[in-house]
Image: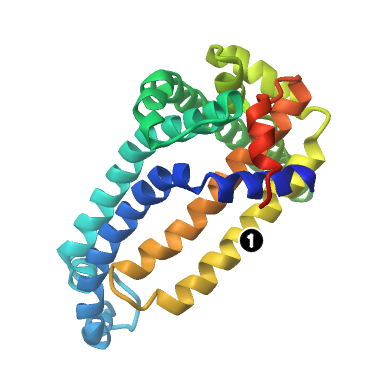
Amino acid sequence: MRYLENAFKFTFKNFIITIPLLVAMAIPSMVMGVGSLGFLFNIKNFEQIFSQMLDNNGQFMPTYHMFLSLYGPTMIISMIVSTFLTLVLSILVYPATYGMINKKYETGISTLSDMTNSMTKYIGRFVLYGLLKIAMWIGMVVVYLILIAIAIVIVTAVSSVAGAILIVLFTLAFIAACIALAVYTSMWFTSVCVEDTDIMTGLKNSFRYVAGSFWTILGMSILISLLGTIAGTIIGMVVGWIPIIGGAVSSIVSYLAEFISIVFFFEIYREKSGKYACEEYYKQMNSGF
C-alpha cells in the first residue's frame, strides 16, 4: 500500500502535470458527445426503425440503412474521428506524461513547460513500444486460435468430450497468459524512461523487476482500475446526462486513475532498481500533503 499511497501523494502534489493527459483524452469523448446528439435525436423514432428491421416472419434483419437511420451519419463520423484522435493524442501525450513524471523524480522540478521536451525525447521509443506490444498481443491471440482449432479438430475426429476439455483448458491458459503478460510488461516504458534505455532493454528490466512484485502489481492495478471505474460511473450518473460535457468529465476521472497507475509503476521500479529519486523530491513529498 505504501507504493499506492505515494502514487496518490505524487498525483495531487503535482496535479499540474496531469493536465495534458486529462485534457487530451477528454477531447475524443467530447467528439463522441457531439455524435451522440444525433443518436438522441433519432431515438424518438426507435420503435418505427426497429419495426422496419423485422421481416415478414418477425425475424430481426438489421440493414446498413436501418443502422444509419438510428445512429445517423453524425454519430458514425464522430466515432471514426474520436478513434483517430484517441490514437494521435495518445502518441503525443503519453510520452510527455511519462517524461514529466520521470523529470520530477530526477530533479524535483517538473512543470508544463517540460511537456514538449519530454514528448520529443520519448515519442520515438513510445511508438516502437506500442507497436511491439500490439505485436505481442496479436501473437498471443494467434497462438490461442491455433490451439482452439486443434481442439475443434479433436472434437470432430476423436472425442467431443476431450475436445471440449481442451477448449476449456486452452481458454483458461490464454486468460492466465494475458494476465501474466500485462503484469510483466507493466513497467516496460517506465524502465525506458528511468534508465533512458532502448525498448528491448526496457522489456528485460520490466520482467526482471516485476518478478518479485507480481501479486502486488496485479492487486494494486486491479484496485486502481476498480476505483477509477467506480468513480467514473458515479460521476457519469451525475453529469452523464449533460450533452458533450458529461462524457468528457467521466473520461477525466478514468484517466486520472491511469495517471496514478503510471506513478505507481514508477514508485515500484525506482525502489526495486535502486534508482531512487533526488533529495529535493523527497523534501517536497514529505512537506505535508
Closer-to-camera residue (74/122): 122
List x then y, in percent, for residue 238. Answer: 46, 78
* Corner quadrant of residue 189: top right
Task: Identify residue type, mark 1.
Answer: Leu
Would you say residue 159 is visible in this rendering?
A: no
Q: Is residue 27 above or below residue 285?
A: below
Q: Residue at x 69, y 34 (%)?
A: 282
Colour mode of the rendering: rainbow
List x then y, in percent, for residue 251. Answer: 43, 58
Closer-to-camera residue (277/94): 277
Would you say residue 281 is visible in this rendering?
A: yes
Question: Label 1's element?
Answer: helix
Left/right of residue 40 with respect to residue 161 in the rendered view = left
Q: Is residue 30 above or below residue 140?
A: below
List x then y, in percent, for residue 46. Answer: 26, 83
Question: Which residue has dot 1 on it?
Answer: 227
* Corner quadrant of residue 275: top right
Q: Residue at x 53, y 33 (%)?
A: 101
For the view shown, which residue lies furthest in the right direction? 212
Q: Is residue 69 above or below residue 81?
A: below
Q: Residue at x 83, y 29 (%)?
A: 212
